[in-house]
Amino acid sequence: MQLKEINPVNFRIFGSPVDSLAGYEDVTPVVHDEDIRISSALWSYEDDILVEPVTGVGVMFVRAEDGIIQKFLFDHMAVIRAGVEFCILPYECRLTYRLYARTARQLTPVTTVLSGTGFVPGLSIHTLYTVLYQEKDQHFSYHGDEYPFWEFVYVQKGQLSCELDGRAFDLKQGQLIFFPPHKVQKQKDDGKPVTFLSITFDGEISHAGIIGGHAVYADDDCQRIIQDILREDKDGDICADDMIVCELTRLLITVLRNIHADSIVTRIPPRLRVNVDNSYVTECVNLIHQNITGSITLPWLAKQLSLSPSYLSSLFKQKVGRSISEYVRLVRLEKVKDMIAEGRYTIAQISDILGYCSPTYLSTEFKREYGISPKEYAKMIN
């Protein structure tokens, strides 16, 4: 979270910055000299108090009325209003400050641990091994092996058939994937020439289980990043490898966000909201929304809930008023609308991501439900 400055605008709902001890000359200050950088409580006072930094760098945590805790750089004398919940912690060094108060301090526990330490990235690339832009003739085949590092693959032209620990899938033109380390992978074309970019690297990758082995289409943002990587590799300018690492990190984050965005329905219209007094139906609805980009069948849902398919089907229809297959169809179409509105994918790509048998079938279903084609809908909202 970005540190804010204690100024009359940013700090106005909590107090105000001051330049003197006016009004507090008669108060004996409590001198704080500490280097403890963690707190699980906020402070508050019945009257206004004044805080004055002396040495070191500190961070002030302040809770707003909406419950969100904001962070300020504690480098300026300030008056904090009565009842405002806050605390002050050293920021990577020892901190000394004076606190002027006429009433005793009250403590309020918080569930989130407050820390005066710097941010440690959860995603960082330690080593860049290879950047290979490969143009393969037909009948290309890689026998497969296991490596202790990550591999990124993006198919620019053609199609690449891949196998990851025995799981087979096809990377189509415009798709990318991150192969996780210590997994056996094989690659081959589909009998036609294929052009693809391959990058090997290692590092600390947060949410590796989400990113690894997940084939997705490269949206406009991803394609721009990939082109920047290719340009840096080709030009070989000063610090080109460092720039490639930066762009690759940005690509990882972009792909992670895209996967997360595609995995949920971002907007649920009133007709699809379900509020029933049955935990099985509620969980079933949640499973549908959470897995809408995958294959959802009645047997699979029943297995997740430890129910028989016939019982789940009857219970769902009774409580929701629709069959499970009809509900899945409607949720998937709402997801189509969301993805069209985002503007990241073509209709063909949306069809592939959501598991339609063809873009034509998607368009037919969409028009049957909403009265206009997906292309007409895209023009209407853009």
Image (cartoon, rainbow, N blue to C red):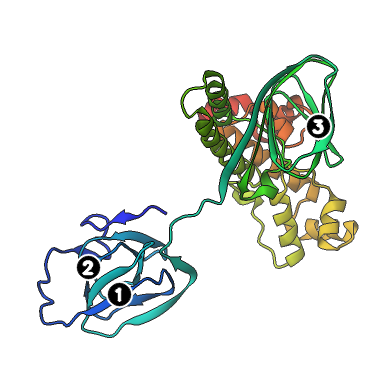
Q: What residue type is labelled 2?
A: Val
Q: Is residue 184 visible?
A: yes
Residue for badge 3: 162
Q: What residue type is labelled 3?
A: Cys
Q: Is residue 366 left or right of residue 315?
A: left
Q: In this view, does 206 lie to the left or right of 44?
A: right
What residue lies at 21% left-to-right and 83% top-to-bottom? 102
Crowding near the residue tagged with mark 1, few <14, some 14–19, many ≥20 C-alpha atoms within 10 Å: some
Instruction: Measure the alpha-carbon separation of dots 1 and 2.
Output: 9 Å
Query: Mark 3 and 2 residues: CB-CB less than 8 Å, in contact?
Result: no
Q: In this view, does 234 lie to the left or right of 167?
A: left
Mark 3 or mark 2, earlier in chain: 2
Q: Position of residue 153 (x, y in %)?
A: 69, 30
What residue lies at 72% left-to-right and 48% top-to-bottom? 291
Q: What residue type is labelled 1?
A: Asp
Q: Can residue 62 be seen in this view?
A: no
The answer to whether 57 is drawn above or below residue 254 in the figure is below
Determine whether the residue tagged by mark 2 lies in a helix, strand or loop.
strand
Determine whether the residue tagged by mark 1 lies in a helix, strand or loop.
strand
Residue for badge 2: 54
Residue for badge 1: 33
Instruction: Measure the alpha-carbon separation of dots 1 and 3.
Output: 60 Å
Instruction: Measure the alpha-carbon separation of dots 3 and 2.
Output: 62 Å
What residue lies at 75% left-to-right and 24% top-to-bottom? 360
Q: Where is residue 270 in the image (x, y as percent from the top left)?
A: 60, 51
Q: Position of residue 89 (x, y in %)?
A: 36, 68
Mark 1 or mark 3, earlier in chain: 1
What residue lies at 38% left-to-right and 52% top-to-bottom? 2
Q: Is 37 in front, or is 226?
A: 37
The answer to whether 7 is drawn above or below residue 331 in the figure is below
Q: Position of residue 311 (x, y in %)?
A: 87, 61
Place residue 193 in its image quadrant.
Answer: top right
